[in-house]
Image (cartoon, rainbow, N blue to C red):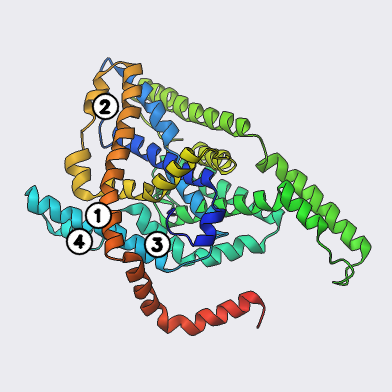
Amino acid sequence: MDGNMRTGRERQQRNLGIDLLRIFCMFLICILHVCGQGRAMVRYAGREEVWYSVYILETAAYCAVNTYGMISGYVGVRSVRRPSRIVELWLRVFWYSALGTLIAVTFFHLPVESDTLYQALLPTMWKTYWYFSSYVGVFVIEPYLNRLVKSLGSAGKKKLMITLFLLCSVFTMVPRVANRDFLGIGAGYSFLWLSVMYIIGACVRELTDQNGPERQKQECSEPGGAETGITETETTAGVKEQKEDSEKNVDFLHRSGGFYGMLYIICVLVTWISKILIENWTTSVYGEARYGRLLFSYASPTIVICAFCLLMIFSRLKCRGRVLRELIRFFSPLAFSVYLMQLQPYFWEYVLAGRYQFIAKLGPAAACLMVLVMAAALYLECTAVDLVRMAAFRLLRIRRVAQVITDFALRPFAGLTEQENREASGEV
């Protein structure tokens, strides 16, 4: 979930393309907040062309949350699990929630209510930051999700991905428009949905690594036919089956970056155009716009495909150049705090609300350009604030504090953890 939460070995093996994707996704989230809470996407009578122009940017950015969930699975399925990571993240959440509230009340004399205090002191339970609250649940069951994914063969992983996509995205599309949430997905604002995104991201990592050219060469060169008692015929059959399975996966997960880029653009346009056509048609029939969000939801099939495409594009990027690599390493650990800063209750209500409404009065091209500029400025503002938080955390040795808290909390489960590790290593 966060770039600075890895061990030294993981830093050496880290995929900078994924770190760049974290940064890009947070920029897309800034676009969503500029258009939504910032009111850059106000629909004025007679200026619909501006509204539709800005809406295509929001459509293109809407997959960012799904992509973040997929990144968690893509990285988590191969990462060394460090429980203190979630404690450290919670302390960061608490820093923005509690300290931000204290500053707002003390220095700006903003009103404080009981709900505000609960949101500040219990950000996870009160869902002040819905994504983090849901992610805590995913983090707890992450080892079991990883075991599920790793226990399946290539065909099983593909079937699991397709099944989850059909069940949780395609089949819930029409009921969602009628405000019927029969699976409890909550339009994507839920622990269940993030778990689905995690599994898809984990499957992508396992399939692409398992069936990539280097992995295939390695597996073909590994000895073991006679040593394991497998006959030559069985070995040949197994290799043939693996080859056929790999060829099927190539069609699905080893397309070119250009292919995924085109698919992303097509899904964005389909989502955007469908909204225009459906709303115009329902306005002429019912006298008001209806069902415009048929494909406009985190759980929408086109939005999920967009997230998948971004993951496939960025995961294979080769980030060359010392300056670019250093910039990625600098901004990636700070990306999640950009979200925390914007969702801080007082910042959301008193700073961000209506801040960019002037953009809706510009021309279509100027409005789109200004949304991008303001989103970038908002990203940099939040990053600058987080540098103060990072310095304070280093001074207070928060990582060490998080480790102490974790060790104390997990002490009663030490025996269970050791038993689980022995089972996983085959000693029992």
> Real-space Cα distance between discs 2 and 4?
32 Å
As drawn, the residue found furthest toward the front would be: 322
Of helix, strand and loop, which one carries label 3?
helix
Q: Name the residue tied to disc 4.
A: 118
Expressed as whole percent of the image width and height from the top left, the position of residue 369 reads 35, 23
Badge 1 vs badge 3, beta-carbon distance below 8 Å = no
Residue at the image position 21 percent from the left and 63 percent from the top: 121
Residue at the image position 18 percent from the left and 48 percent from the top: 346
> Real-space Cα distance between discs 1 and 3?
17 Å
Sequence-wise, the earlier of marks 1 and 3 is 1
Q: Nearer the viewer, mark 1 or mark 2?
A: 1
- The amino acid marked with disc number 2 is Val
Crowd tier of the residue under label 4, counting other residues whose Cα lies within 10 Å: few below 14, some 14–19, many 20 or above = some
> Real-space Cα distance between discs 1 and 2?
29 Å
Expressed as whole percent of the image width and height from the top left, the position of residue 241 reads 82, 53
Q: Name the residue tied to disc 2.
A: 42
> Real-space Cα distance between discs 3 and 4?
18 Å
Crowd tier of the residue under label 1, counting other residues whose Cα lies within 10 Å: few below 14, some 14–19, many 20 or above = many
Q: Nearer the viewer, residue 270 or 374?
A: 374
Q: Name the residue tied to disc 3.
A: 136
Sequence-wise, the earlier of marks 2 and 4 is 2
Badge 1 vs badge 2, beta-carbon distance below 8 Å = no
Number of numbered discs visible in the structure rendering: 4
- The amino acid marked with disc number 3 is Val
Q: Nearer the viewer, mark 1 or mark 4?
A: 1
